[in-house]
Image: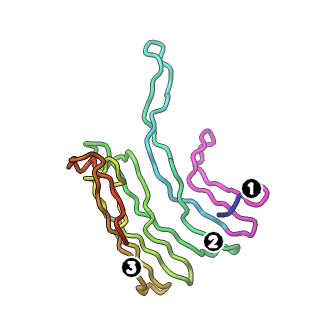
Amino acid sequence: MIKLTPFTSKIEYKRPDNPATLILDSFTITSESGIQYVFKDYDLNMMNVWKKNHPLNGPMYADKQYRSAFYISSILDENGQELVKYTYLRDMKYPPGVNEQATITETNKLTRIEIKDHGIIEINYNKNEEYGKYNDIFSINNIVLKTSSNIFVKKYIFNYSYLSPYLGSADPQELRRSLKFL
């Protein structure tokens, strides 16, 4: 962890040309030593917000999309050379009956970390919506370590069990995922 203060770091952000809103496209944190942490990947979610007051109907609200989280995309050295690159799987959810024209939410799952001259970490997921009520629909299936030349080094496989918090319940939506072993 690096403690950031206004005296030891600088935060720069990029945003659309509309100065009336503070919507960020990306931002970069530069440390005192010149290391840059670039945040370009983000999640999108929906929020019900106040739109206006109607003279007869009172307050009116609408669903609006917002960027709910930013993720680190890369780390650059003091010369702007990439030291670490992060890659994400983007999962999109669509409203019923829209045929993938507009998303309700977009979330990211880290899938790859490339560390210059050191190696690669790949994170592979399983997607199972059957257990989605109390669990993330994604679970890590395995993590693969590779050299910087993309040569396999080691693989860790995750094994889960699904337990019911209620005695005798067999409903998959009620089950809770638990890591059994690696």
Residue 30: in magenta span: yes
Numbered disc 1: secondary structure: loop
Marks 3/2: CA distance? 28 Å
Quarter of the image where the N terminus is located: bottom right
Please state the horizontal and vertical placement of residue 174, each as a whole percent of the image. 28, 47
- The quadrant in which the C terminus is found is bottom left
Residue kind at label 3, given as amino acid type: Lys
* Element under disc 2: strand
The percent coordinates of residue 119 (x first, y second) are 51, 81
Please rate how many residues cluster around mark 3, counting C-alpha atoms within 10 Å: few if below 14, some from 14 to 19, many from 20: some
Mark 3 residue element: strand
Other-residue count near label 1 (Cα within 10 Å), few / some / many at <14 / 14–19 / ≥20: few
Q: Is residue 32 magenta?
A: yes
> Counting residues from the N terminus, which is met first, the one under dot 3 or under dot 2?
2
Gap between marks 3 and 1 measured at Cα: 39 Å
Q: Determine whether 14 is above or below 78 in the image.
A: above
Extreme-right residue of the structure: 7
Q: Quadrant of residue 159?
A: bottom left
Instruction: Bin the neighbour count of mark 2 within 10 Å (Cα to Cα): few under 14, some 14-19, many 20 and up.
Output: some
**Residue 135 at x, y percent in the picture:** 35, 52
Instruction: Give the residue pinned by disc 2.
Output: 76
**Kind of residue at badge 2:** Leu
| Residue 5: mark in rendering | 1
Residue 104 got which mark? none
- Which stretch is magenta? 6-35
Nearest to the eye among marks 3 and 2: give it: 3
Say which residue appears at 64% left-offset and 60% top-offset. Answer: 28
